[in-house]
């Protein structure tokens, strides 16, 4: 007799079956959705932070390049020469500037202004057609702020103007031209300030590069000044509101009021509001020693903001939901058919069996299509009976390798030993579902961090059928969380190991401090310190007689108003002893929680040291008075010696009288009296050149140089012809005896060169040769610039020996000869040229000297 069921019974059985099938699908869908949303938010936050960091590095690198160009131009050899010579050097400098502005393409103007503010050299970019401004159009800029501010700086200091739009004749230049001006003072060889070098930097290049850098990012990049006006905005019509009347109301604060309060009160951070995700940091352009008029370093700043719009976030989360709902709807529909089939199983068992197999196949194909999750079916003993493609991708086993294996194959030996696998399965069987996070093992032995959801599957009689095991690889998420934890640990370590006492307090008193605070105030534990009232650590009055409680209230009010105040304070330890300290009191806000941070530095030893220094200064002042008269006497003697040294140098008229040769000489002592020496002497149709460099500087070196010059001239007057080697040895013997008599340790490098014009009839094989230059003696490398521009460097190390070290140097003296043609140039110099240093302690060097001579 057939069994008939009422419609209500069939409906009840169908609903129960359908819900039992649908619940695991719903659980998996919800789990996946929230996990994906969390991962997506972390990814967006990291991406925004990295975008901000890239923009920050772009600005920092660009500033370094500009400052490098500026310092190079201010110390350039051409500009140093210009300070002492004529307009020919001015033209060379202008060409240097023109080359820079042409190839750099980031500067609107490059200028050098003298100490009166007059433009000496100026080049204009002129919209890609650079030119040198004629002298008659150069202007005096003494009244402009950038000249007065830059000219007051010290050597190596950099002036940076505000970032604004360029003005022409009192009006904003069109099209808009964002501009930054960089300037630095120029000093001559004596350390005298002679003018400034000024670069007008085209800010559009920097802003365009920032836009280009963020094109493929999920968030927009903004650059704000400290008033909240846009310097860079996704909408160009929002920019430069502080200069354009029609855009005065377009500020970040007007558009995002609450967000601006947070951004402007903190240096950096990241937060969500109803408007979206905001990530920001503060850029201090003056923090590296640059200057901007009278504005303090901490008062001149920009805000760099990465903004992800709320609609973009909502769209992203909506897409995640769509990606999950679509498979869920398919599963729900499939579960609907399965429930209908199971409901009619008693009527058409065979047909229902076939349809069930078909439905299970469809379910398997659907699960196989999920590749970001490892979905594994286990039997009641925890052995694998099936899995999807996502499991094969994540765990790296093939289907043949894994079917029949126990779940423990994915666990470490430690987990197996501790019975963790059995605990997970037991918990799922007892509670219906369990979740776990921890390391799992891939086939290649590498660990990965996994989030696992295990759900027990039961038959209609409630006996355990098996388990679903869903695994998601969350290694990237964990790595991100670990980086955040490391950053927090690093901050705490810096806080605890900071050399000064740091304490945090609110209106109720102290709530945190570092270890230095305990040591400086004599507390054993942090709890002991926090339990004390702040007034316990101050005497009733300060050294100036003011009441401590009234005075500290004044400082607190200043800190609240200006965010920071610094002052000196007399503290009292728990044992009653006092100490003098410097205090930096900062007003902070942790969200809506007003907090004060006090940084305290014990300056007792410094105060004692200052007293000792003052006493020492008094003693030094007395000694300076005693030394003044002695220095004046010695200075007069040195000046007489310097004048004698200059008087015996060959005069310009003597050099002009030399036939067939153009001779020029110059000497500038590094000290009042130097040890450098040169001379040019004629005998017969020969010209004798002598050059030397006495070790050291000062009176003794100058006297020895005069002695050498006198000896050379005396010896030459007694010889019609010269044997250079013999001449040098005789000179060495004379100088050696005089140095011994002076009881001195001085010596000198010295070289003689004898020029003899060529008798063309005797050298008919090469009519281009006009003379022979014979040289002997050890000195700096000699440079010859040939007519065709080739450079020859003659090493003289093997041609002699330092004069004055030995009585007889004949065995070390050698001689060589060089042919000279019309147009050849011979350069002789002392080491004061090649060993000159710039502000970066870099030597001028022989290579640069050769390039200049060439």
Image: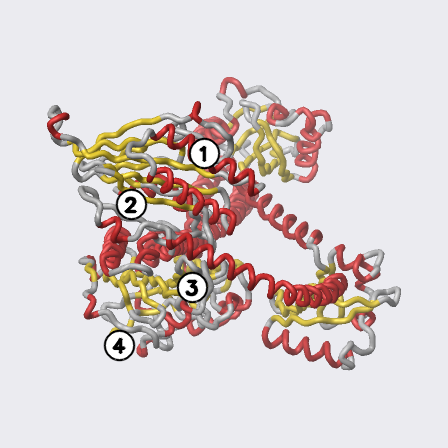
According to the picture, the residue beneath numbered tag 2 turns out to be: 852
In the image, residue 704 lies at what x, y percent? 47, 45
Numbered disc in front, either 2 or 4: 2
Q: Give whichever of discs 1 and 4 has the lower sequence position.
A: 4
Q: Image quadrant of residue 15?
A: top right
In-front residue for pair 155/558: 155
In the image, residue 484 lies at what x, y percent? 59, 48
The answer to whether marks 1 and 2 mark residues whose Cβ atoms lie closer than 8 Å is: no
Please tell me how crowded label 1 is: few (under 14), some (14-19), or many (20+) other residues with Cα within 10 Å.
many
In the image, residue 370 lies at what x, y percent? 45, 35
Q: Which mark is residue 84?
A: none
Please tell me how crowded label 4 is: few (under 14), some (14-19), or many (20+) other residues with Cα within 10 Å.
few
The answer to whether marks 2 and 3 mark residues whose Cβ atoms lie closer than 8 Å is: no
Q: Which residue occupies 59% across, 37% down? A: 452
Please tell me how crowded label 2 is: few (under 14), some (14-19), or many (20+) other residues with Cα within 10 Å.
few
Which quarter of the image is occupied by the N terminus?
Answer: top right
Q: CA distance from mark 2 to mark 4?
A: 44 Å
Q: Is residue 463 left or right of residue 97?
A: right
The answer to whether marks 3 and 4 mark residues whose Cβ atoms lie closer than 8 Å is: no
Numbered disc in front, either 3 or 1: 1
Count of marks overlaid on the render = 4
Q: Which mark is residue 732?
A: 1
According to the picture, the residue beneath numbered tag 4 turns out to be: 171
Q: Give whichever of discs 3 and 4 has the lower sequence position.
A: 4
Please tell me how crowded label 3 is: few (under 14), some (14-19), or many (20+) other residues with Cα within 10 Å.
few
């Amino acid at each position: 007799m057939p069994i008939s069921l009422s419609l209500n019974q069939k409906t009840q059985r169908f609903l129960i079956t359908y819900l039992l099938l649908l619940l695991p699908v719903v659980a998996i869908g919800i789990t996946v959705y929230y996990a994906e949303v969390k991962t997506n938010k972390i990814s967006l936050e990291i991406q925004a932070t990295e975008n901000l960091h890239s923009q920050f590095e772009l600005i920092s690198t660009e500033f370094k390049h500009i400052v490098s160009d500026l310092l190079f131009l201010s110390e350039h050899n051409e500009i140093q020469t210009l300070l002492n010579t004529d307009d020919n050097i001015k033209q060379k400098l202008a060409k240097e500037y023109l080359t820079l502005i042409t190839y750099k393409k980031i500067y609107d103007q490059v200028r050098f202004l003298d100490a009166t503010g007059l433009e000496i050299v100026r080049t204009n970019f002129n919209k890609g057609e650079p030119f040198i401004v004629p002298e008659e159009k150069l202007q005096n800029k003494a009244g402009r702020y950038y000249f007065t501010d830059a000219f007051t700086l010290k050597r190596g200091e950099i002036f940076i103007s505000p970032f604004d739009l360029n003005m022409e004749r009192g009006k904003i230049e069109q099209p808009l031209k964002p501009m930054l001006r960089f300037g630095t003072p120029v000093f001559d060889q004596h350390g005298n300030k002679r003018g400034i070098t000024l670069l007008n930097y085209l800010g559009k290049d920097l802003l365009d590069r920032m836009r280009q850098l963020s094109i493929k990012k999920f968030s927009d990049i903004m650059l704000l000044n400290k008033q909240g006006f846009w310097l860079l905005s996704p909408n160009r019509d929002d920019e430069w509101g502080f200069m354009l009347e029609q855009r005065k109301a377009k500020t970040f604060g007007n558009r995002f009021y609450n967000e601006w309060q947070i951004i402007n009160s903190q240096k950096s951070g990241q937060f969500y509001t109803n408007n979206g995700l905001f990530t920001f940091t503060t850029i201090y352009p003056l923090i590296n020693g640059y200057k901007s008029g009278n504005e303090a370093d901490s008062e001149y700043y920009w805000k760099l903001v990465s903004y992800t719009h709320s609609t973009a976030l909502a769209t992203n989360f909506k897409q995640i939901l769509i990606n999950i709902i679509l498979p869920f709807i398919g599963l729900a529909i499939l579960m609907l058919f399965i429930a209908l089939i199971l409901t009619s199983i008693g009527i058409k068992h065979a047909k229902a069996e076939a349809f069930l197999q078909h439905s299970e196949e469809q379910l398997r194909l659907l699960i196989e299509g999920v590749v970001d999750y490892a979905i594994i079916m286990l039997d009641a003993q925890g052995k694998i009976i099936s899995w999807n493609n996502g499991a094969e991708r994540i765990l790296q086993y093939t289907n043949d390798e894994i079917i029949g294996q126990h779940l423990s194959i994915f666990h470490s030996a430690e987990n197996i030993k501790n019975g963790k696998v059995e605990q997970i399965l037991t918990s799922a069987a007892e509670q219906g579902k369990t979740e776990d996070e921890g390391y799992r093992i891939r086939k290649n032995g590498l660990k990965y961090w996994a989030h696992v959801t295990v759900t027990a599957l039961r038959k209609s009689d409630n006996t355990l059928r098996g388990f679903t095991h869903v695994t998601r690889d969350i290694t990237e998420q964990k790595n991100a969380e670990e980086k955040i934890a490391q950053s927090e640990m690093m901050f705490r370590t810096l806080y605890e190991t900071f050399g000064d006492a740091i304490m945090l307090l609110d209106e109720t008193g102290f709530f945190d401090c570092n270890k230095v605070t305990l040591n400086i105030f004599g507390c054993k534990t942090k709890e002991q310190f926090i339990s004390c009232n702040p007034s316990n650590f101050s005497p009733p009055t300060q050294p100036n007689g003011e009441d401590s409680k009234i005075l500290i209230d004044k400082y607190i009010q200043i800190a609240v108003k200006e965010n920071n105040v610094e002052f000196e304070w007399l503290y009292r330890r728990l044992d009653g002893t006092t100490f003098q300290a410097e205090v930096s009191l900062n007003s902070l806000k942790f969200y809506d929680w007003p907090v004060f941070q006090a940084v305290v530095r014990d300056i007792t030893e410094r105060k004692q040291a200052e007293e000792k220094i003052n006493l020492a200064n008094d003693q030094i002042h007395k000694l300076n008075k005693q030394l003044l008269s002695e220095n004046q006497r010695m200075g007069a003697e040195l000046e007489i010696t310097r004048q004698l040294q200059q008087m015996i140098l060959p005069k310009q008229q003597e050099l002009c009288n030399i036939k067939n040769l153009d001779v020029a000489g110059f000497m500038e002592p590094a000290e009042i009296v130097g040890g450098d020496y040169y001379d040019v002497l004629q005998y017969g149709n020969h010209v004798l050149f002598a050059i030397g460099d006495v070790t050291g500087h000062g009176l003794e070196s100058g006297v020895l140089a005069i002695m050498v010059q006198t000896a050379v001239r005396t010896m030459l007057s007694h010889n019609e012809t010269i044997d250079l080697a013999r001449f040098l040895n005789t000179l060495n013997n004379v100088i050696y005896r005089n140095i011994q008599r002076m009881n001195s340790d001085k010596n000198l490098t010295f070289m003689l060169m004898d020029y003899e014009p060529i008798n063309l009839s005797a050298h008919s094989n090469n009519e281009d040769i006009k003379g022979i230059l014979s040289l002997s003696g050890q000195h700096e490398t000699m440079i010859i610039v040939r007519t065709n521009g080739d450079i020859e460097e003659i090493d003289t190390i093997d041609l002699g020996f330092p004069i004055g070290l030995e009585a007889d140097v004949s065995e070390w003296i050698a001689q060589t000869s060089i042919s000279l043609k019309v147009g050849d140039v011979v350069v002789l110099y002392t080491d004061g040229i090649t060993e000159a240093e710039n502000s970066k302690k870099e030597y001028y060097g022989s290579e640069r000297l050769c390039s200049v001579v060439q």
